[in-house]
């Protein structure tokens, strides 16, 4: 009957609309994931670690109430402290030695800052929450080091394992592809802006004449 046909048409239209909504949502999620991966690999480079290590550590930071941007600053400062300890800072060298943490590997190269963060977590969890712990954190990670206490008090190794289990760890291959994708979008945006500027240069005199 006509009513049945009409019902099927309505169902078809609703299904099409739902499919479009799902597709739009999926595209949005992929775009946001690409932005996150791009930002993560850039912060990982600055921090002296891999994107796998950094995104795993980001999960632990989230649980400790620390943003990815703040984590990037903390790990960057830690990497700098490791470098200084390995190249002449007696105070930082003593601090790492007292904590029983090596900043270089057997070949004399700086260790991954994420791995050193794991070691710090192992030590900090054994220490009482007092001024000494806060001072150590600030000496190793700058003025905002005190904000890292909750992170260092947690079991970073377990949190990183959880991040992997939840699919939150981004691989270098994926992050590099996302970075290239974003770079291409930026180039496309530049091309469109350039075309707009050329068109404006052509029609600007006419527009000015119309508005006089």
Image (cartoon, rainbow, N blue to C red):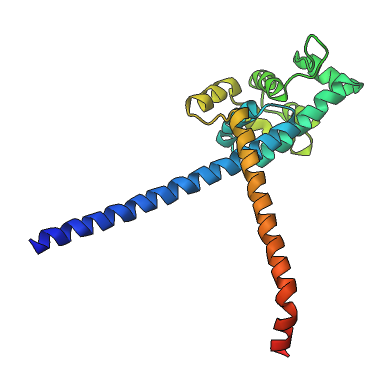
Residue nearest the observer in this picture, 25 or 121: 25
Please say if 76 is above or below 27. above
Please say if 119 is above or below 29. above
- Counting from the top left corner in percent of width and height, residue 70 is at 68, 40
Is residue 100 something one can see in this rendering?
A: yes
Please say if 33 is above or below 197. above
Is residue 68 something one can see in this rendering?
A: no
Q: Is residue 107 left or right of residue 11?
A: right
> In the picture, which quadrant includes the C terminus?
bottom right
**In which image quadrant can residue 170 be found?**
top right
- Counting from the top left corner in percent of width and height, residue 134 is at 73, 31
Q: Residue at x 73, y 87 (%)?
A: 209
Which residue reaches farthest top? 106
Q: How many marks?
A: 0
Q: Is residue 20 left or right of residue 11?
A: right
Q: Is residue 14 left or right of residue 136?
A: left
Q: Residue at x 16, y 59 (%)?
A: 7
């Amino acid at each position: 009957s006509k009513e049945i046909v009409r019902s099927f048409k309505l169902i078809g239209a609703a299904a099409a609309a739902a499919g479009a909504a799902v597709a739009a949502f999926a595209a949005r999620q992929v775009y946001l994931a690409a932005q996150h991966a791009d930002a993560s690999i850039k912060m990982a480079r600055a921090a002296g670690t891999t994107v796998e290590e950094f995104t795993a550590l980001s999960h632990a930071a989230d649980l400790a109430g620390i943003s990815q941007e703040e984590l990037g600053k903390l790990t960057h400062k830690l990497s700098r402290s490791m470098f200084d300890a390995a190249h002449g800072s007696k105070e930082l060298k003593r601090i790492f030695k007292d904590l029983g943490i090596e900043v270089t590997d057997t070949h004399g190269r700086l260790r991954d800052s994420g791995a050193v963060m794991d070691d710090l977590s192992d030590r900090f969890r054994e220490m009482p929450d007092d001024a000494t712990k806060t001072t150590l954190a600030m000496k190793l990670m700058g003025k905002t080091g005190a904000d890292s206490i909750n992170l260092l008090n947690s079991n970073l190794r377990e949190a990183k394992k959880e991040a992997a289990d939840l699919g939150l760890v981004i691989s270098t291959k994926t992050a590099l592809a996302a970075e290239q994708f974003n770079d291409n979008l930026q180039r496309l945006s530049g091309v469109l802006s350039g075309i707009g500027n050329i068109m404006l240069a052509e029609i600007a005199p006419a527009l000015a004449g119309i508005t006089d």
